[in-house]
Amino acid sequence: MTSDAGPYSEALNPAAGVLDPDQLIKNACIAAQSDCLGGDANEIEHFRHDFETLCHSLNEEAGLSESGFRRARSRLHMMLVTRLHTIKQRAAQPDLASRKIIAPLIGTGLPRSGTTFLHGLLTCDTGHRAVRAWEAMLSPQLVDLPLRSPIDLFQRILAFQGFTEDEVTQRHPFDANLPEECVFLQETNCSGLYSDFFDVPRFVEAIADKGAQDLQWQNDLMKLLQGADTDRRWVLKAPTHLFSWEELLIAFPDSCIFMNHRDPAKVIPSVAGLTVAIRSLFSKDAPDGRQIAKQRLLEWSSAIRKVMHWRAKHTAARIADIHFAELTMQPMETIARLYDAFDLKLTAQTKDAMSRYVDGHRSKKGAGRQYSLAEYGLDESSIDSAFGDYVRHFGIVLERDA
């Protein structure tokens, strides 16, 4: 542990051992100098139930290695401390409920379809703001924390938890100062993000209907982060918004939603590969990539069908569809169409910044990890059976000979 990590020192503690929810909460309360986990008894009860279920699932189902226990313990301590500070700050601002998040740009769609690239591109606009990873997980500006450098601290915590290892970053970038997904804003509500990190079926079942609550938590946290900076438009993204589509529209009723599309035959193996890489940081046994791919196939195809059904009934909804093939081949033209769809002004300054971002992205991009359907026990028939209607409806370019 290091003293300059302040209340997050325990997140760098190399101690291992089973995860005791009561002890974890006690340690976090001491570190945060607060014992309030929610605004009222009902919120506290629900959080404690979810957190205890997660700890039991981690101990009994996830098959954690010794280093996996250390890393999980680090993650949970960080989450608890940030939650405690957030609750404290939320209580100190009684006008929070009346504040507004105005017309955010929200990206979703299938994962591994260019959402991270597009999210980063949109942050080049100085009129936009995204949540950075360190803000989502540490939120030091919410309270007077004795931190020397929150960005540096979170980078050290990411490294401690294994997220800076090549096997992970080659598949998805994790960095303290990068724009991050909404799921990390929701993590401090003990959200479904942990199902990507760990094999915790009991926990997943327990939080199956938590989408609206997670989005409300995210909304409050965004208001705290926003403060008086109401002139810039939020740019958000999370493929998992597909699972809580209607709840998203209730939480952000004036949102401008863009939905990314890509050939599912490329998406599902890539998602499975990323999940395997992340779970390998924690698991003592090699994760079963084929089983994970089967689960992801069912989950994402079900989510897509529900969203397609909603969109068929709400044809007037203003949603911009972004195709991976067009985004990668013609990023600036795609951005121009996105801005037109939502009547946004694309200035010359923003175009220049975005062009530089595209050039930088292309110069850093290597050959990339190649994923095959067979590697994960899938074939084109299984993909077409699950996603055929989706591919045909949106006219998605197939990449199967690429």
Image (cartoon, rainbow, N blue to C red):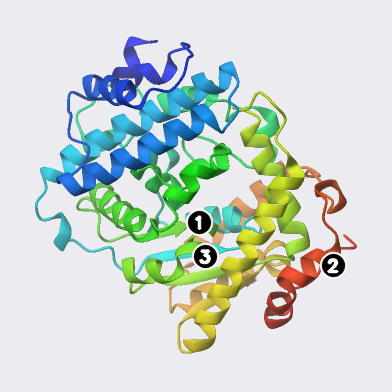
Q: Residues within 10 Å of mark 3 (few under 14, many from 20)?
A: many
At mark 2, the secondary structure is helix
Residue 44: image location, x then y, percent: 22, 42
Q: Amino acid at mark 1?
A: Ala
Give the quadrant of the C terminus: bottom right
Determine the CA span between mark 2 and mark 1. Answer: 28 Å
- Determine which residue is flagged by label 3: 242
Residue 254: image location, x then y, percent: 34, 74
Q: Residues within 10 Å of mark 2 (few under 14, many from 20)?
A: few
The answer to whether residue 368 is left or right of residue 79 is right
The answer to whether residue 343 is left or right of residue 43 is right
Q: Check whether the beta carbons of the residues at disc 2 and disc 1 lie within 8 A of each other.
A: no
* On screen, residue 128 above or below 384: above
Residue 46: image location, x then y, percent: 28, 46
Q: Look at 61% across and 59% down and name the residue there.
A: 299
Determine the CA span between mark 3 and mark 2. Answer: 24 Å
* On screen, residue 248 above or below 17: below
- Determine which residue is flagged by label 1: 238
Q: Amino acid at mark 2?
A: Ser
At mark 3, the secondary structure is helix
- Determine which residue is flagged by label 2: 381
Q: Look at 87% across and 51% down and name the residue there.
A: 374
